[in-house]
Image (spheres, rainbow, N blue to C red):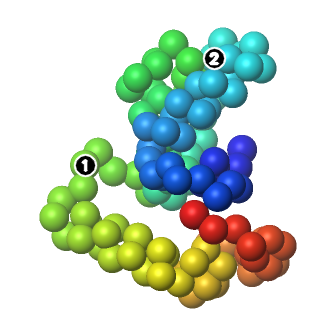
């Protein structure tokens, strides 16, 4: 599932509750009552966590990596810095600089026009 703000020029803040709602809507659209959820690293894990809390009837099982229950002041400052850097650099440059170990560069190069 591609995140809304990764595919469109949307004036929508990227949040875990937004993505959890997208997943719930997709499950509804596909006629899936309950599904196993796998979330990897941050914006992959946090929506699964949100979905499990907000719509537990939709989640058959949940496996997460790299999530958090709440952000302390240091983590919030880091997230704010990353957001500012992302806004200034754009999706492509930010992803190439900070995701080299997590995301293959071929994936980033596939669509360098994506902006959040």
| Residue under the point 51% across and 13% down | 57
| Residue under the point 55% across and 22% down | 59
Quadrant of the rendered structure where residue 82 is?
Answer: bottom left
Horizontal arrangement in the rendering, residue 83 relative to residue 80 (left or right): right
Location of the N terminus by quadrant is: top right
| Residue under the point 64% across and 58% down | 9
User: Which element carries disc 2, helix, strand or loop?
Assistant: loop
| Residue under the point 49% across and 76% down | 86
User: Which element carries disc 1, helix, strand or loop?
Assistant: loop
Report crowding for label 1: few under 14, some 14 to 19, many 20 or more residues within 10 A (C-alpha): few
Query: Vertical placement of 62 versus 38: above or below?
Result: above
Relative image position of residue 111 (x, y in whole percent): 80, 71
Relative image position of residue 52 (x, y in whole percent): 45, 27
Horizontal arrangement in the rendering, residue 13 relative to residue 3 (left or right): left
Q: Name the residue under label 1.
A: 70
Relative image position of residue 108 (x, y in whole percent): 74, 75
Quadrant of the rendered structure where residue 58 is?
Answer: top right
Q: Residue furthest left?
A: 73
Q: Mark 2 points at which residue?
A: 34
Relative image position of residue 78 (x, y in whole percent): 30, 73
Front residue of this view, candidates 2 and 58:
2
Residue 35 appears in view: no
Number of marks in the rendered image? 2
Q: How far apart are marks 2 and 1 (CA)?
A: 26 Å
C-beta proximity under 8 Å, tags 2 and 1: no
Horizontal arrangement in the rendering, residue 23 relative to residue 78 (left or right): right
Earlier in the chain: of badge 2 and badge 1, it is 2
Query: Vertical placement of 85 versus 66: above or below?
Result: below
């Amino acid at each position: 599932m591609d995140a809304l703000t990764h595919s469109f020029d949307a004036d929508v803040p990227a949040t875990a509750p937004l993505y959890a709602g997208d997943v719930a809507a997709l499950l509804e659209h596909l006629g899936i009552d309950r599904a196993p959820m796998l979330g990897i690293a941050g914006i992959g894990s946090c929506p699964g966590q949100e979905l499990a809390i907000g719509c537990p009837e939709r989640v058959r099982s949940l496996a997460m990596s790299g999530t958090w229950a709440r952000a302390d002041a240091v983590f919030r400052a880091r997230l704010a810095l990353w957001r500012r850097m992302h806004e200034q650099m754009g999706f492509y440059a930010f992803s190439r600089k900070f995701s080299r170990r997590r995301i293959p560069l071929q994936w980033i190069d596939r669509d360098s026009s994506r902006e959040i």
